[in-house]
Amino acid sequence: MISYVDVAIIGGGIFGVETALSAASLGLKVKVFEANDTIMSGATKNNQNRLHLGFHYPRDIETGRQSIRGFYAFKHKYQDCITGQFDNAYFIASKGSLTRPEEYLKFCRELGVNYKEINPSDFHIDLNGVDIGILCEEVVYDVALLKSTLLQSLEKSQINLALNTRISEVQHSQDGFEIFDHNGNKVKAKFLINATYSDINRITAALNYNILQNHYEYTVVPVVELDIPRVGITIMDGPFYTLLPFGKTSKYLLYSVEQSVISTVSSDQMPKEWHCPNDAPFNELNPTVYFNNMINDASSFIPILKTAKVIDFLQGPRMVLSNKDCTDGRPSVIKIFDNKYITIFSGKIDHSIWVADDIKLVLRDKFAL
């Protein structure tokens, strides 16, 4: 069976869906391919679910400014999926921080976003080993609510969504691309957008475009129960910890800069086994021992974590630009090839708004709309 579309998008995470909605708003015929059984089940889900205002990136103001660009638009567009009903604080560790307290406060001023400096001893959760802190207006999104909202938007926009569909081959054609899925179906598209995140280089290489080596990480984020008022705590700036509400639930996500990353690979493509949780690196660990080790370390800063109970683990691959360790930068990058193929190197979730807007301008020119 052969079908025809104006724009094909591979990847049904937040970047792929936002871009699909923008393309459809131009009146273009759009199809989205997603390898999993639902959208938003990959990197969009398996992270800290935080919308950034840049406070996490004192060594890379570019990432901070990109976050600001998308934060307010995302927060407004998906306000029913977002919660900010908690104190969200960042603290600089007394030892081992790559950013000194005075440097961090200078960075916060340069960001130009509202914040309030606080004394850690005045914070309503006991903390150890931190010097200064700030309260900011960052929020978290509820991935279940966000998924439901976006599914409705896709249906309303009459976007063809192909779930459980993995792309087996992509070829250039005279007027665009021929795309073959694992079921043997073929789609002809005039424009192709690659929003597969960690799988981005596989398709790009198959189309004979140049690819760069990336840094791939397999990450694990425990979901925990903790009997405290809703709060967000991030210990900066180095191998430390973040505790954030898990969307609008009563649970929390606990992230460790070092321990949440359980496997790393620098390569031009992600290891194939990472696509399947049953074959992924986390299966080689003892979950109880892993969680207890994380709690033992994290509770040296946040003592109440000793009472945390693990409920689940979010796990999956992520991709970051190589040679960014010194800045910890997480920018989003749009690349255009031959005015018919786009790759999205996605940084933070809220970047998806401006990325989709920028791609919409490209499509408008391409299709003379």
Image: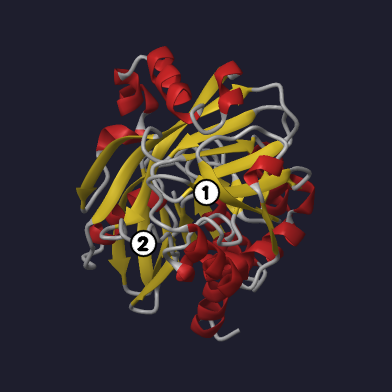
The residue depicted at 72 percent of the width and 58 percent of the height is: 75
Element type at marker 2?
Answer: loop
Up the image or down, 256 lies above or below 339; here it is above
With 107 as the anchor, is 337 left or right in this view? left
Up the image or down, 45 lies above or below 22; here it is above
Q: Which mark is residue 27?
A: none
State the residue position of label 2. 327
Residue 171 in picture, x, y percent from top left: 29, 61
What's under tag 2, amino acid-wise?
A: Thr
Colouring of the image? secondary structure
| Structural crowding at the residue carrying mark 1, measured as other residues with C-alpha within 10 Å and reported as few (<14), some (14–19) or many (≥20) | many
The residue depicted at 44 percent of the width and 48 percent of the height is: 1
State the residue position of label 1. 12
Q: Quadrant of residue 21?
A: bottom right
Element type at marker 1?
Answer: loop
Residue 261 in picture, x, y percent from top left: 36, 37
Residue 206 in picture, x, y percent from top left: 24, 58
Nearer to me, 128 or 75: 128
Q: Earlier in the sequence, mark 1 or mark 2?
A: 1
